[in-house]
Amino acid sequence: MARIASGEVGVHHEGREYIFRPSFRRMDELEQDWGIRDQWDDLRSEIDDVRYGTAAIVLWAFFTGSDEDALNLTGYKRDIYHDGEFAGTVYVPGIMDQDEQVVIAMALLRNGLCGVSNFVDKKSDTDSFSSGKFNAYDFVFAIAQNLEISKTEAEDMTMAEYHQALKVMNPERFVDMTEENEKTDALLKAVGWE
């Protein structure tokens, strides 16, 4: 697994790369269909079937490849019939371990909601998710206006890409605390404090 600066997650298997991209469009679809807060909570459930099922939903929502590839990655449940009567359901495992799927799904939701870690707007003290409902189009319309791009282009962006663009456009307003901490550490080291 590779976490990419854009907020995407790449999974490599047998020479192939599978990309999961938490764009605003896909975040909105996940919110409308399943509720992101519910998915976040279910990924932390102590019930394996809940966690695993939710991880598959999240991965499918953000997967950029074909449905067949998604099935091969996540696995699926299949109903079994004997003599024409339902005999039960079996899980057909995918390439990815189910616990690994949960970790990747959590990373994708975090990337989709938070973007760049430690990214801080010096003028804001609000949390975009504190209401319990994520509205991707609050961001899409702000992105289209602030970056002077089309709505479609804004929908295709990830939160991390938006943060990077804001930082480039307004370096005095937005700060990456990781960079700030590294600068402070370097300064302390330069003056003999370690």
Image (tube, grey):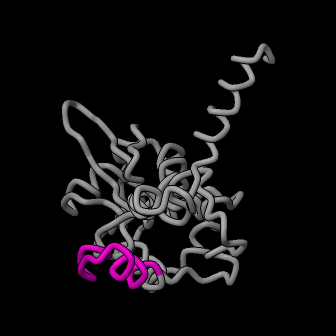
Left or right? Give the position of 117 relative to 15: right
Which quadrant holds residue 24? bottom left
Instruction: Residue 121 in the image: state x and y as whole percent.
Output: 61, 64
- Give the dominant element type of the magenta stretch: helix, strand or loop: helix
Does residue 132 lie above or below 181 as drawn? below
Q: Nearer the viewer, residue 65 or 116?
A: 116
Magenta segment range? 139-154
Tell me which residue sits at (20%, 38%) in the image: 16
Residue farthest along the top direction in this orientation: 192
- Quarter containing the N terminus: top left
Could you say where residue 99 lies in the image, as x and y percent from the top left?
Answer: 54, 45
From the viewer's perspective, is 93 left or right of 171? left
Position in image of residue 132 (x %, y %): 66, 81
Q: Residue at x 45, y 78 (%)?
A: 139
Does 77 appear in magenta? no
Query: Residue 122's x, y, as percent?
Result: 66, 63
Q: Quarter of the image holding residue 39?
A: bottom right
On screen, residue 75 above or below 192: below
Quadrant of the image for the C terminus?
top right
Residue 17, by quadrant, is top left
Q: From this viewpoint, is residue 77 visible?
A: no
Between 89 and 171, the one lying in front of the other is: 171
Residue at 81 percent across and 18 percent down: it is 193
Using the image as rendered, state which of residue 93 and residue 178 is in the foreground. 178
